[in-house]
Amino acid sequence: MDDLLLRRVRPGLGGDLADVRVNDGRVTSITEPGSSGFAARVVDGHGGTLLPGLVDAHVHVVQWATFRRRIPLDAARSAGEAIELLLAHLLATPAPQTELVVGAGFRDALWPDKPHKDLLQRALPGRAVALFSADLHTLWLSPAALKLIGRDHPTGVLLEGDCMTATAQLPTAAIDVQDRWVAEAVAAAAARGVTQIVDYEYADTVADWARRGAPAARISCVVARHLLDQTIERGHRTGDVLPDSGGLLTVGPYKLFVDGSLNTRTAYCHDPYPGVDSPGSLELPPEELVPLMRRAFDHGLIPAVHAIGDRANTIALDAFEEVGCPGRIEHAQLLSPADVPRFAALGVIAAVQPSHQPDDRDVADRHWHGRTERAFPYRSLLESGARLEFGSDAPVAPLDPWDGIASAVSRTDDDRPPWHPEQAISLPDALAASSGGRRGVAVGDIADLTVTAADPSTLSPADLRTLPVTATIVGGRVTHHI
């Protein structure tokens, strides 16, 4: 859209009523209401607040699009309850006996019993069943599902690398069906004010997005570890705009894993988990991590390193220091006090997911007992000068930045008191972390914009989570409007 006029909007928190004109993808004027004349397209903001467009800096897009159609298991408080939820859903919505049964969202870290393939076999004899944990680091398979992918396993519960390999081997919907689901998921994100998504799918995201056509948001296509050589051969560098994408598709960072996750007790820590001798799982030791980061950076690819446990974060920061490159640490959930100031000092972005904090507080209290004052330490990172960028890690949490913003501000998502409220941050800081660092709308800005129905600064955290979005604009193009 070359000529767009946003009427009756309030730029910024507590802003005054104004008309905002957009031309050639940029904000070109902010004037008093009624003084801007005509435009090719007019969008009435109805007095809503105009903010920079929201960015979800960590999404697994195909998995999120698929997750929206899987049997939800997030309410399960035991392996037995997960089976009951599965059976209740299949009773209400029968599926062909030959079809893979897929559920998702279970969190077994606090379960009194353990998932096992035999439980699935007893409940659904001979059926192929695949159940994904909420954090995507555990895959629970029935004997028939194991046979489907040519595997055997003593428990049917696969973790970390085994989980991801098996996930790739499971049957999936046809590509055209997946692409339709992805388009619907991105449109739903636009309806929540999202103008950019960083896609961490473990696939050739560049090729996949080039096939899909113009999305309803900008997409940064993250490079998976196994595609480093191919990406170098293509000549792609982080930040490159992909051809024939209208500027909507760019090459993202290069993703590496140092450890696992809290819920699977594979996040790599300095101290062992209670009741066991294991401190977690080191997925990529320094002698492998550093050369991969150096090779990527030498070819223009910025590393994005998954690190959740405190020891994993130390290893990741040490690697950034040794290579001498900027980059990102994804998650940074548990940090040693000495590592907090290193993010700013090394120019490493703390890419965090605030919705995980209320989701994981009980698990952290049990498995990181005595250490939780340095878990999800958003205020400490900000005060040290680090840059925070928020994401959802969808489908681990819903692709809805308002949920993350509310969690970062309140440190709770229910009627319980805030969890470590000393690490809460202000609403302006949370909005900036959800907007790629932008803190307002000014003439000359790129026209990635969000109009909310109310001023977020007047709302409670609970109301922030359900705040209606009136309009979303990407480069001057309206992607959502009510």
Image (spheres, rainbow, N blue to C red):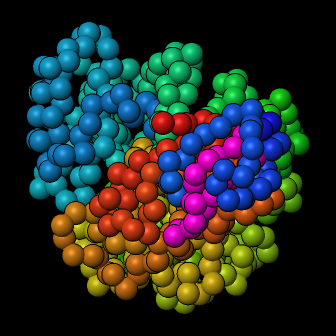
Q: Nearer the viewer, residue 290 or 343?
A: 343
Q: Position of residue 246 (x, y in %)?
A: 80, 34
Q: In screen coordinates, is 263 left or right of 177?
A: left
Question: Is 7 covered by the magenta stretch?
Answer: yes
> Which secondary structure is most common in the magenta stretch?
strand
Say which quadrant the N terminus sits in.
top right
Q: Position of residue 105 (x, y in %)?
A: 30, 43
Q: In screen coordinates, is 157 left or right of 333?
A: left
Q: Position of residue 84 (x, y in %)?
A: 11, 34
Q: Nearer the viewer, residue 296 or 477?
A: 477
Q: Give residue 15's quadrant in the image.
A: bottom right
Q: Give residue 354's quadrant in the image.
A: bottom left
Tell which residue pokes out farthest to the bottom in this image: 338
Vertical order, 210 against 447 (above or below) = above
Question: Is 312 covered by the magenta stretch?
Answer: no
- Taking the spot 14% from the left edge, 48% from the top edge, the residue there is 78
- Taking the spot 36% from the left edge, 65% from the top edge, the residue there is 459
- Taking the spot 12% from the left edge, 27% from the top edge, the residue there is 88
Count of all numbered marks drawn on residues in the image: 0
- Taking the spot 73% from the left edge, 28% from the top edge, the residue there is 210
Q: In this view of the protein, can residue 225 be seen by the observer?
A: no
Q: Position of residue 224 (x, y in %)?
A: 65, 45
* Magenta segment: 4-22
Q: Nearer the viewer, residue 258 or 304?
A: 304
Q: In this view of the protein, can residue 181 be seen by the observer?
A: yes
Q: Give residue 204's quadrant in the image.
A: top right
